[in-house]
Amino acid sequence: MNSSQSSQLYSGLSKEKLPSHVAIIMDGNGRWAKKRLMNRINGHEKGADAVRAIIETSREIGISNLTLYAFSTENWQRPRAEVEALMSLLIKFLKSEQKNMMENSIRLSMIGQIERLPEKVQTLVQSIMDLTKDNNGLRLNLALSYGSRAEIVRMVRMLAEKAKKGLIDPISITENMVADNLYTRDIPDPDLLIRTSGEMRISNFLLWQIAYSEIYVTDTLWPDFGKDEFIGILKEYQKRDRRFGKVNT
Ligand code: FPP
């Protein structure tokens, strides 16, 4: 894209009011494939292209944190062939994006049960997180084997363990201490949560963190989600009046 095209695309978008963290529930790959009489895996492959486009747009416009729900704790219950295809796709995606991440100062991070991922995925994710750890552009945060309830249980266990050892007093547990024991401890809460494919649910995603997020649901299936629609949603977000439970004076 040349600069005049990009300024046209981004016109009306205020740099000052950009969300610092956008989280996305990428849904609808299966339906996208079904509509085309293709198999679900083809839908996921096309979905990976949409992931690339959204990363590029986020980087270009200067969003600091992008969290993508790529694989949930519940997704392990899908047919084995689909789980394996998703893992292979993830490997292919990460290998192909490594160079782009270094060239564009993208930092990779992940939230979720890394220990449950196949060894090959674990090693690759860890090596790219290490490689990109000093990059200070977009932080790309992949939710892999992620479930918010499992994350909350893990946090409760961590705090209970500290209390058992006498390191903390249960009565002094604060919201900040809870947040500090979640996977997202060093990432701000999402300002904007987007869900594709029209479903009006949260699906066990960032339950604690989205307390005050603006939510936007689009009917577009994830493989069809692209830059123009993303920019449109960001513009809509900028029109919203965020009050965080207070009143505007
Ligand atoms: C939901 O579609 C999508 C997923 C379960 C996985 C998301 C994966 C990708 C977007 C592709 C790979 C990701 C990366 C980071 C390379 P669905 O299968 O639930 O669709 P459906 O609800 O229409 O069946």
Image (cartoon, grey):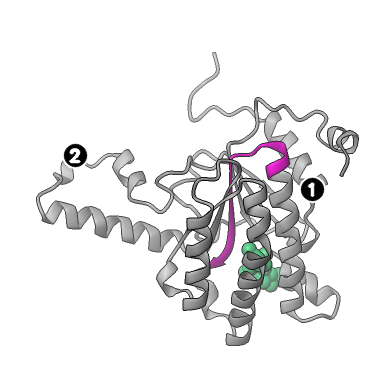
**Which of the four quarters of the rendered structure image does ligand 1 lie in?**
bottom right
Where in the figure is residue 67, as x and y percent of width and height? 57, 52
- From the viewer's perspective, is the residue at label 1 or at label 2 nearer? 1
Outermost residue on the top side: it is: 249
What range of the chain is rendered magenta?
A: 59-73
Gap in angstroms between the C-alphas marked 1 and 2? 45 Å
Q: Type of residue at label 2? A: Ser
The residue that disc 1 covers is: 227
Label 1: state its secondary structure: helix
Say which residue appears at 86% left-offset and 75% top-offset.
Answer: 36
Q: Is residue 61 magenta?
A: yes
The answer to whether 57 is drawn above or below residue 18 in the figure is: below
Left/right of residue 200 with respect to residue 127 in the rendered view:
right
Upstream in sequence: badge 1 or badge 2: 2
Taking depth in this image into account, of 94 and 183 the one nearest to the observer is 94
| Image position, residue 35 (x, y; %) | 84, 74
Q: How many marks?
A: 2
Q: Quadrant of the C terminus?
A: top right
The answer to whether residue 170 is left or right of residue 155 is: left
On screen, residue 87 above or below 14? below
Instruction: Give whichever of 153, 1 is nearer the camera.
Output: 1
In magenta stretch: residue 45:
no
Callout 1 touching callout 2 (CB < 8 Å)? no
Residue lying at 41% horizontally and 61% vertically, measured from the top left: 149
Tell me which residue sits at (69%, 51%) in the image.
Answer: 55
- Whole-percent x, y for residue 78 in the image: 58, 80
Q: Which mark is residue 172?
A: 2
